Image (tube, rainbow, N blue to C red):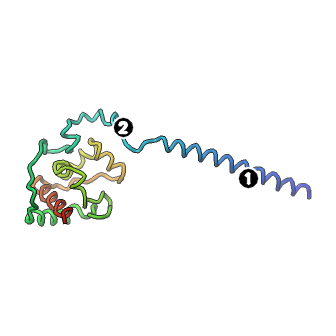
Amino acid sequence: MNITSSNHLFLFLFAIFFAFTVQSCASGESEEAETVTEEPRRSEFDDLNLTPFQEEHGLGPITERITISEEIDEELSIRGQSIFEMKCQICHGMDQRKIGPSLGDVVERRSPEFIMNFIVNPGENVRNHPVGLDLLAEHHTEMPYQNVNLDEARAIYEYLRDYYNQ
């Protein structure tokens, strides 16, 4: 009878010790996690050697601001929708995330030049631009090259702009 009582006491004390050990370890991890920042520090991207234009508008063939009419070009938007459905829709939703980010409000978040540069030059932007690196970290996949030329990228941009303004 005494042996059983001793075993119960030992198990009880061991359980308390184990609970305190787990609690103290978990508390340390939580405090440590709170001190880690999610936002990349600017110094992490200093070695990318981007020009101010590239930082704001991405890497690609568009190297200066472009002029876009205030009015939506309906014909261009329809063409862009067709291209989007053929080359983009499998990975991008407009109102929900799929493999890649949702694009319903991308025209609010990014410049026309950025969007078009990213469409025609996804690989370089994903590997060498802070926004691309952040997207890769978030979505865990690189946007594949879709062989979209600048005219098609402009049409896709018009469709995205038309969608956002509806």
Image quarter (top left, top right, bottom left or bottom right) of the C terminus = bottom left
* x, y percent for residue 139: 35, 54
> Which numbered mark, 2 or 1, is in the foreground of this view?
2
How many numbered badges does the structure rendering display?
A: 2
Residue occupying image coordinates x 64% and y 48%: 23
Residue occupying image coordinates x 16% and y 48%: 113
Per the model, the C-alpha gap separating discs 2 and 1 is 43 Å
Of 147 and 79, the residue lying toward us: 79
Q: Amino acid at mark 2?
A: Arg
Q: Amino acid at mark 1?
A: Ala
Of 73 and 130, the residue lying toward us: 73
* x, y percent for residue 165: 18, 63
Q: Which disc is residue 51 wearing?
A: none
Is residue 10 positioned above or below 164 on the image?
above
Q: For numbered disc 2, what is the local secondary structure?
A: loop
Residue occupying image coordinates x 68% and y 47%: 20
Residue labelled with disc 1 = 15
Horizontal arrangement in the rendering, residue 139 relative to residue 162 (left or right): right
Kindly indicate whether the residue at mark 1 contacts the one at mark 2 (C-beta within 8 angstroms).
Answer: no
Of 163 and 139, the residue lying toward us: 163
Image quarter (top left, top right, bottom left or bottom right) of the N terminus = bottom right
* x, y percent for residue 121: 19, 48
Residue furthest to the right: 1
Residue labelled with disc 2 = 41
Residue occupying image coordinates x 41% and y 45%: 38
Horizontal arrangement in the rendering, residue 45 relative to residue 157 (left or right): right
Q: For numbered disc 1, what is the local secondary structure?
A: helix
Label 1 Cα neighbours within 10 Å, binned few <14 / some 14-19 / many ≥20: few
Which callout, 2 or 1, points at the residue further toward the start of the chain? Answer: 1
Horizontal arrangement in the rendering, residue 131 relative to residue 149 (left or right): right
Label 2 Cα neighbours within 10 Å, binned few <14 / some 14-19 / many ≥20: few
* x, y percent for residue 19: 68, 51
